[in-house]
Image (cartoon, rainbow, N blue to C red):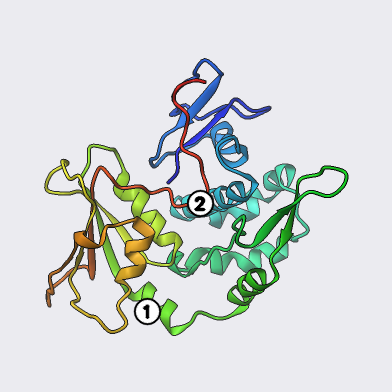
Amino acid sequence: DCAIQDQELIDAKPPSQATGPDADGRYILPIGAYTLDGDGALWYARTRHSSSDFDRGRRQQQLLRAIWRAARANGQITKLPELWSQLTQVVQTDLTFEDMVGLLPYALNIDPDRIEHFVFNRLYHTKPWTPPDGSNVQLPVPDTVQQLMEDFYTPPSESQVAVAGLKIEVRNGTPNADWDRVAADRLGWSGYNAVAAGNADNTQYTDTILIDHTGQTKGSKIQDVVKILNIKPENIRVEPDANRTADYEVILGSNYNSCTYQVLQPDETGG
C-alpha cells in the first residue's frame, strides 16, 4: 500500500518485482500486490530508508498476516506436526509444540476481518528526545499509549461489530494492476469486510468514487471509509439499492493514494 525504496540489504535482496537500481543503488517496490520469495519478504520487512522502524513494525505484521493466510489456503497449517522440526530451526520461540497445537483451531477458523492490528505511530504515541550522550530516543506519550493499550485489551465494541458486518466491493478503475486488491486489503486492515472485485467498467477513472447503496445516515460508516481511502467528499454518491450485493462500492481512480502511513515518497531522481 506504500511504495518502498532502499538499497540491497545485508542478507536481503530486493524483490524481483522492484525496479532499479538507480545511480545510488536504490530499488523501488511500487504499490501493488505481490508474491515475494524469502529474500524479497525479508527486504520488505527490514527496509526503512523511506520509512522508519515504526512503519517496519507495520510491514512485519503485514507479512505475518500474509503467511498465515497463504498457509491456511494451501493446507500447510494442518501439517504443523511434520513441519515443527523445520520451523524451530529458523524460528526461536518459547511456545511448545503442545501450545501451537492448541492454537491450531483458531488459525484455521478465525475470520480475517476479526483480527485487529496495533502499532505505535511516531509523534502520536511517542515523542523524540535526545539525551546527553546524543542517542536517538523515543519517549512514550502516556495518554495515547494508554488508549492504545485499552483498545488492545477491550473486546470489540458495537461499532467495530457493525464495521465487520458491512460488505464493500472494490473495483479497479485504473490501468494499475491489482489496485483493487491493495485497497481491499487496506480496508481489511481497519476491520472492514472488503472484497477485491476486479476491474471497473473502464480503466480511465481519474477520481476515486464511493457509492453508498445503503442510504443510511444514522450509524453510517461512510466517513471512515472516505478517510481510509482518501476519497474527496464530492465523489460520494448515495444510490440506495434494496437488492444490493454490497453495502458500499468503491471505484478506484488514478488519483487514489493508498499510502496513509508515515512513509516518504520514493526519490526517483537517483540523487
When asked about the image quadrant of residue 254, the answer is: top left
Frontmost residue, 166 versus 20: 20
Crowd band around label 1 with a 10 angstrom C-alpha radius: few (<14), some (14–19), many (20+): some
What residue is disc 1 on? 162
Tag 1 and tag 2, C-beta contact below 8 Å: no
Residue beneath the point at 55% across and 69% down: 105
Percent coordinates x, y for residue 172 in the rendering: 23, 47
Question: In the image, what residue type sits under mark 1?
Answer: Ala
What's under tag 2, amino acid-wise? Answer: Ala
User: In the image, is residue 127 above or below residue 46?
Assistant: below
The one nearer the camera, 97 or 60, is 60
Where does the image place residue 5, in percent across and percent down from the top left?
52, 32
Q: Secondary structure under badge 2? A: helix
Mark earlier in primary sequence (1, 2): 2
Residue under label 2: 71
Is 159 on the left or on the right of 78, as rendered? left
Query: Callout 1: helix, strand or loop?
Result: helix
Left or right of 138? Residue 184 is left
